[in-house]
Image: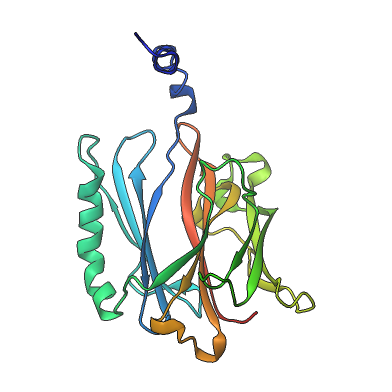
Amino acid sequence: MIRLSTLLISLALSAGFFEAHAADIAQRKIFGFSPQGKYFAFEQFGIQDGSGFPYSDIFIINVKKNSWVKGTPIRTLLHNENISPLKARSASYQKARPILRKLEIGENQLLLASNPMTEISADPKKVAFRAFATDPPFGPRFELTLSEFKLKAAHCDGVTKNSLASGFALHLRSLTSPGSPLRVLARDTSIPKSRGCPLDYAIADVISFEPAGFALQNNESVFAILLYVYAHGFEGRSGRFIAVTASGITG
């Protein structure tokens, strides 16, 4: 007997339902931080909409400057729709490996909060979290909020109405010390071409540097926040990641 759910999916596919909602939403891999938390690295990868070509981008970021390390990001796009995404990922990793090794990037991170785009019960613009994973809980608590506003972007001329694209601001508030000032982690003044023509943003992940034994200098946390960036794509909205990094965070 054919299950109802299977039948409905088959009918939807035959009617082209999912084709109308085709999109290129990247996946991500976290490589981690350097031993002192000065650098952070992650990869985004997937299948490019329209072409069907596999891609992989590896980003290595100077945490304090919140900027790309020289020689990065490392981007691979294989112009063959029959090639596995693993080929693109392997090619990017081979190029990035010398830098990752030089900076001693390792899996020394702690995922504090995550909101995949499939999640429908969480607020994509706000997340509250603790700095440490312990039971009973201790340490500072924070609230991260994301807001958006329109900015003129010359490279979006003919793509968006009036060449306007969405910029964002990211704020961190201490829930442990409610009277402490709101910290601005990032605020756009322009839209870089590398971001395309953004339509919307969402909080994807909050990641902290976790040295051995929680030996944080002066109890200051180091965060890397991944945001989804939704922009005009060939077959709908495409989703990519950008990172915002911050150090010297106290509760």
Instruction: Tell me the residue at 44%/68% (across/down).
Output: 110
Outermost residue, right side? 179
Picture coordinates of residue 122, whole percent (x, y): 62, 47
Instruction: Tell me the residue at 48%/23% (across/down).
Output: 20
Instruction: Tell me the residue at 35%/68% (across/down).
Output: 72
Q: In this view, does 33 lie above or below 239?
A: below
- Taking 4 as reference, is 147 left or right? right
Q: Answer whether residue 215 is visible to the viewer in this image.
A: yes
Q: Is residue 152 above or below residue 181?
A: above
The colour scheme used to paint the residues is: rainbow
Quadrant in which residue 58 is drawn:
bottom left
Along the line of sight, the residue nearer the viewer: 118 or 103: 118
Outermost residue, bottom side? 218
Q: In which quarter of the image is the N terminus?
A: top left
Instruction: Tell me the residue at 50%/33% (across/down).
Output: 236
- Taking 243 as reference, is 99 left or right? left
Picture coordinates of residue 49, whole percent (x, y): 39, 36
Q: Answer whether residue 60 is visible to the viewer in this image.
A: no
Along the line of sight, the residue nearer the viewer: 226 or 180: 180
Along the line of sight, the residue nearer the viewer: 87 or 128: 128
Outermost residue, top side? 1
Q: How many marks?
A: 0
Quadrant in which residue 180 is drawn:
bottom right
Q: Quadrant of the C terminus?
A: bottom right
- Taking 97 as reference, is 241 left or right? right
Picture coordinates of residue 95, whole percent (x, y): 22, 64
